[in-house]
Amino acid sequence: MKLTIYGGRRLFGDLTVDGAKNAALPLLAATLLTDDDISLQNIPDVGDVRTMIQILEHLGKRVESAHSRESYLIRTVEPPLSSAPEHLVRRLRASFCLLGPLVARTGLAQISLPGGCPIGVRPVDLHLKGLRALGAQIESLGNLFQAQTHKLHPAEIYLDFPSVGATEQIMMTAALIPGRTVISNAAQDPEVHDLARLLIKMGAGIMIEPGRLIIEGAPRLQGTSHRVIPDRITAGTFLIAGAIAGGDVTVHCQPLHLEALMSKLDELGFEIQEHVESIRIVSEGPGSYNGGRVEARPYPGFATDLQPQMMALLALARGTTTIKETVWENRFSQAAELAQMGAQIRIDGSTATIEGVEYLRGTEVRGSDTRAGAALVLAGLAAQGLTTVLDSEEHIARGYADLPGELNRLGADIIVEEEEKASEEKEVVGGRG
């Protein structure tokens, strides 16, 4: 896919974000814990969700659209299989969370190492530590992990890092084990809590305490209905879009989930107005705000999934900015592409130092992962001239239902083409009226 962005358009208006992709994926995985029907609403129509649905259908589920594209009824048509197709698992990091639910249901599960965006290594040691503590015997067969058990049991588990995926994996598995399981140093992200709410509706008992989760498992889980929370990363992306392009943008979302971002935008000098179910940002655009310090950390810290977009914004700030990434070791891929647009960025290990510039210039850049691609689109909104973002693997569509379309509705000027077709055409010179 090729996105052509005509820079210099300010953004005005309001929009409502879709359901959270990072919540929808484990919610879909949790449907494997029961043979009963599960109804899920506000599911975003993004590439990663479509991949997870394909995996579920291979494993014995039928996923039906119910009333709208965002609502699905998940039914069991066959007993669950013990393994998922490798070619689908390779496309989706969250697919590894299927290992626990499958071993809890079938006693045997096989799954390959997960894929997804190339933002760093994906250690699964905390997943495996948790499953072993619950009684699973796990073998590594090359790139394949096999888990089996005669009987799982509750346990007390301490996570060395508050991994979202490991927390969700252990929580789903423990929900189907009678007795009390405790996860200490558990992730406390809104998406984790959303999964907890679904599991409670299905019949598990879950208590959320500071730094830990207590799960009272049940011998059988039941069907239910659940609505996915709004996507805080999508909401944050649009707020940063309003900040970098300039204008007046209101995003309907859950402000409570974006406190770290709102605090940082306020610190940089933007006008931020928080309402019960929306956030408004007013900006004068490039050069009107200050640099600062951003440190991406586990929730409730600044979200790593908003760090690339923030780097694009801070490339046009006054003064010097430092960004420290503590979650992923390869999350600065957008820096080299932003440098081609004129950004002054120096990388030293997990820290990026940015000297704000007066303007960015449009050029051809390539998005290497979902959030880096979004960051380059945002940079193109503020750049002088025409920016071309090449996204041959459609990373952006894996995490955003329609990023260019929503930005266009706010006043941006973005053309989307298939990259194969676009590559045959001559370079476009200048902009549109």
Image (cartoon, rainbow, N blue to C red):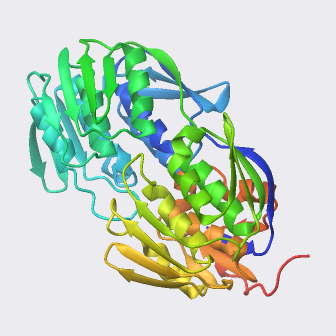
Name, please, the residue furthest toward the right. 433
**Residue pictured at 59% horizontal, 38% vertical:** 254
| Quarter of the rendering containing residue 359 | bottom right
| Quarter of the rendering containing residue 264 | bottom right
Q: Where 358 falls versus 151 (above or below)?
A: below
Q: Is residue 164 left or right of residue 13?
A: left
Q: Is residue 411 left or right of residue 56?
A: right
**Residue pictured at 52% horizontal, 41% vertical:** 257
Whole-percent x, y for residue 95 in the image = 34, 44
Task: Report if residue 113 is visible in the image.
Answer: yes
**Residue pictured at 57% horizontal, 81% vertical:** 319
Image quadrant occupied by the C terminus: bottom right
Whole-percent x, y for residue 387 in the image = 68, 79
Whole-percent x, y for residue 2 in the image = 64, 71
Task: Report if residue 331 is visible in the image.
Answer: no
Q: Nearer the viewer, residue 351 or 56?
A: 351
Whole-percent x, y for residue 62 in the image = 47, 27
| Quarter of the rendering containing residue 52 | top left
